[in-house]
Amino acid sequence: EQLICQFHPKKPGDDVAFAPHRDIEHRLNYDANWIDVNGFGSYAIAVISVDPSSAHNGGLYLVPESHLGFDLSQVEKAADNFNENWSLRAYAPQLESGDVLFMHPYLVHWSTPNHSIQSRMSLLSGMCSVGANQGVYPGDLTNEKLCIEN
């Protein structure tokens, strides 16, 4: 089931930044009845790079292995107690136009403002396991179930 299809523009000098978070927090805030049907968060986000992306133009920072060892009951506490040492382990992958980065819903990530002269545009597409989503998301391309025949 498709959850999200968004365009994320970051223009040069626009000061748009996102604080450290896990995408599962957005799911739970939007849909309190979310069900983790597979035990792994039940969805993934694909970040599709339109422009090259790096630390120099407001790209994503990721914390390796930060998705391990958390369950839904710990999400809010973990967000409130962000470990500053994670920032020492974080890195900003360099993505070229057309690269796709798949993110686990519990992966800690953030982005900084784009202070470069280059735009950093990306597309997000999110899919979840059937039965996890209880909410209706806006847009024509969401909440469609895909059935693949073998």
Image: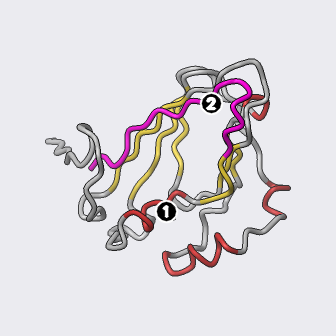
What mark, if any, has residue 24 been given in the picture? 1
Tally of numbered tags: 2
Q: Relative to 4, is 94 on the left or the right?
A: right
Location of residue 12 with respect to 103 vertically, above or below = above
Which residue corresponds to the image point at 29% horizontal and 46% vertical from the top-left?
Answer: 138
Image side of residue 54 versus residue 146, left or right: right
Picture residue at 78% right of the left edge, 69% below the top: 83
Quick one: label 1, few (<14), some, or many (20+) residues within 10 Å? Answer: many
Q: Please give the label number shown on residue 10.
A: 2
- Amino acid type assigned to the residue bearing label 2 in the image: Lys
Of the image marks 1 and 2, the number of the one nearer the N terminus: 2
The disc labelled 1 sits on which kind of residue? Answer: Ile
* Spot occupied by residue 26 in the image (x, y as percentages of width and height): 48, 60
Q: Residue at x 16, y 45 (%)?
A: 147
Q: Which residues are magenta?
A: 1-17
| Residue depicted at 61% across the width and 67% down the height | 68
Please name whichever residue, 145 or 14, is drawn nearer the observer in this view of the structure.
14
* Left or right: 57, with 49 as reference point: right
**Secondary structure beneath disc 1?**
helix
Mark 1 to mark 2 CA distance (whole Å) = 23 Å
When the figure is inspected, residue 72 is found, relative to residue 139, above or below; the finding is: below
Tell me residue 91's x, y (percent): 77, 45
Looking at the image, the residue that sits furthest to the bottom is 73
Nearer-the-camera pick, 129 or 6: 6
